[in-house]
């Protein structure tokens, strides 16, 4: 069950009023401190209790905050006057030039230049700043190197895993090739056994039925026969009968 809304009015009970003041005061001071840190703002806060007790907070110093407030308040009242406005911007420009000069001087000192006018305490403070800066730079460098090493380690693990998978695939392919070669060898052996168990048929005289047959034509040889009796009776000459008979072949 959620908290009920509190009416924004004076609390009649003094004890409850004091408790509420203490809680709200601590929360207000906390918010002021967070605002000054997070936003780099100059914050000044003053709270007086019902008994007249003062509670204050200042990000720099309360005196400088009050002086700055009074100055800006006076300048705000004279802002409509062009001469006052010009004077205000001249003052701001001078202040910015002083800040720029101070920052340039600090930069040169950090670079090891213009150290002649510094005392022991100032040099010690500068050395501490440089050591802190160097420590921060080294920590950042170590962090970057550590992150890069971790990324390289992860990439190495991924590559190793891919190599293992490729090696397993290669072994599987070699195993399949071996099985195929075994099957081919068994099939070849079976064919050779079938050929050995089924010899070619031969006729009784020893000739192979499946052997190729070579045919060759030869010139007809002349045949001699005795002249027929009819030719003798007709009186044909024997030489003519022989020629005619030989011509018919």
Image (spheres, rainbow, N blue to C red):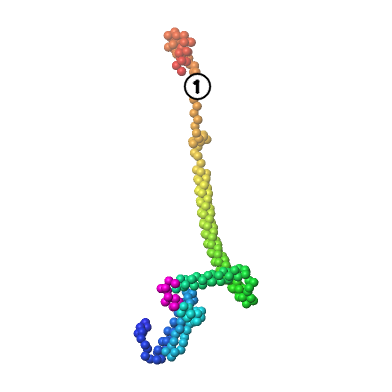
233 vs 206, nearest the viewer: 206
Is 8 on the left or on the right of 125, as rendered?
Answer: left
Residue wearing tag 1: 219
Give the percent coordinates (x, y) of residue 169.
Answer: 51, 57
Magenta-span inclusion, residue 123: no
Which secondary structure, mark 1? Answer: loop
Give the percent coordinates (x, y) of residue 13.
Answer: 38, 91
Q: Is residue 129 above or below residue 57?
A: above
For the point 40% across and 91% down, the residue is 14
Which quadrant of the figure contains the N terminus?
A: bottom left
For the point 52% across and 48% down, the residue is 189
Give the percent coordinates (x, y) of residue 104.
Answer: 56, 69
Q: Quadrant of residue 123?
A: bottom right
For the point 46% across and 73% down, the residue is 88
Q: Quadrant of residue 132?
A: bottom right
Number of numbered tags placed on the structure image = 1
For the point 55% across and 65% down, the residue is 148
Is 17 on the left or on the right of 138, as rendered?
Answer: left
Give the percent coordinates (x, y) of residue 113.
Answer: 62, 68
Q: Is residue 88 above or below residue 26?
A: above
Query: Can residue 134 be seen here?
Result: no
Is 90 on the left or on the right of 121, as rendered?
Answer: left
Q: Is residue 240 above or below residue 203?
A: above
Range of the magenta residues? Answer: 72-83
Magenta stretch, overall SS:
helix
Q: Quadrant of residue 116?
A: bottom right
148 vs 185, nearest the viewer: 148
């Amino acid at each position: 069950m959620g908290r009920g809304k509190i009416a924004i009015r004076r609390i009649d009970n003094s004890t409850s009023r004091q408790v509420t003041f203490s809680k709200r005061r601590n929360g207000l001071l906390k918010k002021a401190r967070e605002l000054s840190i997070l936003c780099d703002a100059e914050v000044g806060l003053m709270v007086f209790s019902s008994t007249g007790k003062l509670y204050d907070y200042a990000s720099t110093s309360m005196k400088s905050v009050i002086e700055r407030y009074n100055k800006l308040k006076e300048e705000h009242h004279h802002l409509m006057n062009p001469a006052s406005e010009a004077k205000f911007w001249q003052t701001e420009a001078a202040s910015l030039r002083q800040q720029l000069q101070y920052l340039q001087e600090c930069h040169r000192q950090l670079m090891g230049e213009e150290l002649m006018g510094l005392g022991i305490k100032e040099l010690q403070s500068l050395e501490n700043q440089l050591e802190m800066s160097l420590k921060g730079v080294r920590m950042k460098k170590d962090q970057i190197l550590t992150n890069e090493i971790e990324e390289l380690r992860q990439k190495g693990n991924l590559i190793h895993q891919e190599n293992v998978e490729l090696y397993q695939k290669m072994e599987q392919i070699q195993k399949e090739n071996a099985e195929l070669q075994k099957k081919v060898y068994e099939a070849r052996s079976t064919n050779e056994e079938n050929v050995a168990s089924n010899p070619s048929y031969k006729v009784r005289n020893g000739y192979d039925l499946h052997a190729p047959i070579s045919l060759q034509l030869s010139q007809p040889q002349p045949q001699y026969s005795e002249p027929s009796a009819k030719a003798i009776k007709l009186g044909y000459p024997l030489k003519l009968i022989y020629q005619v008979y030989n011509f018919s072949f």
